[in-house]
Image: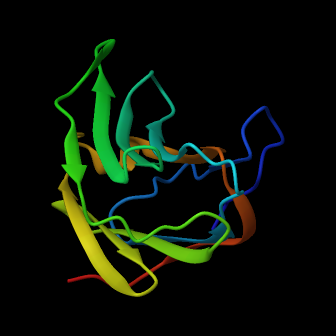
Amino acid sequence: MLVFAVHTSYQFEAFCPDGLCPGWSFLLKGETPAEANKFEINFLCDRDDRIAFHFKPCFTESDIICNYFMANNWGKEERCSNFPFGLKEPFQIEIYSDNEYFYVYVDDTKIMQYKHRVEDLKNITKVQVVNDVNISSLEITKKHYY
């Protein structure tokens, strides 16, 4: 596994040239600061500007917004009103991918699934975490999938 952190203006960014989907698990443990508005987890295609999966909990709306970005346009937002996050509370997010969906678990409870918008999943080679989140640990591991 060739995953490494890159120190940029992002809080975290990792690159895996062989692709992060399907079968990879992204596990983030963290906590939001008291003044948090939002944070984002993005799964990106490294050869262009596509965002295959954009996951954004918004504290001001108590909503999770999911989307994708292709051909210089955002897709139609999908919202999840199941909002399991609290300010200054620790959490664990796992995002797992099979051939059809991203599955999102918060504290071991499935909160949503998001259909893939990128056809060739091997092009999803970067993951980044940005904005209002304090990361305590992060793991990217290959899982067996069916």
Closer to us: 97 or 133: 133
Q: State the residue at coordinates (46%, 53%).
A: 19
| 15 left or right, relative to 106 | right
| 79 left or right, relative to 41 | left
143 in relation to 20, above or below: below
Q: Quadrant of the N terminus?
A: bottom right
Q: Position of residue 130 (x, y in %)?
A: 63, 42
Is residue 116 visible in the rendered structure shown here?
no
Closer to us: 119 or 39: 39
122 in relation to 136, above or below: above
Closer to us: 105 or 132: 132
Q: State the residue at coordinates (50%, 53%).
A: 18
Q: State the residue at coordinates (74%, 46%).
A: 11
Is residue 40 visible in the rendered structure shown here?
yes
Q: Position of residue 120 (x, y in %)?
A: 26, 43
| 116 left or right, relative to 58 | left
| 5 left or right, relative to 139 | right
2 in relation to 63, above or below: below
Quarter-of-image position of residue 105: bottom left
Q: State the residue at coordinates (32%, 64%).
A: 22
Q: Position of residue 123 (x, y in %)?
A: 39, 41
Q: Quadrant of the C terminus?
A: bottom left
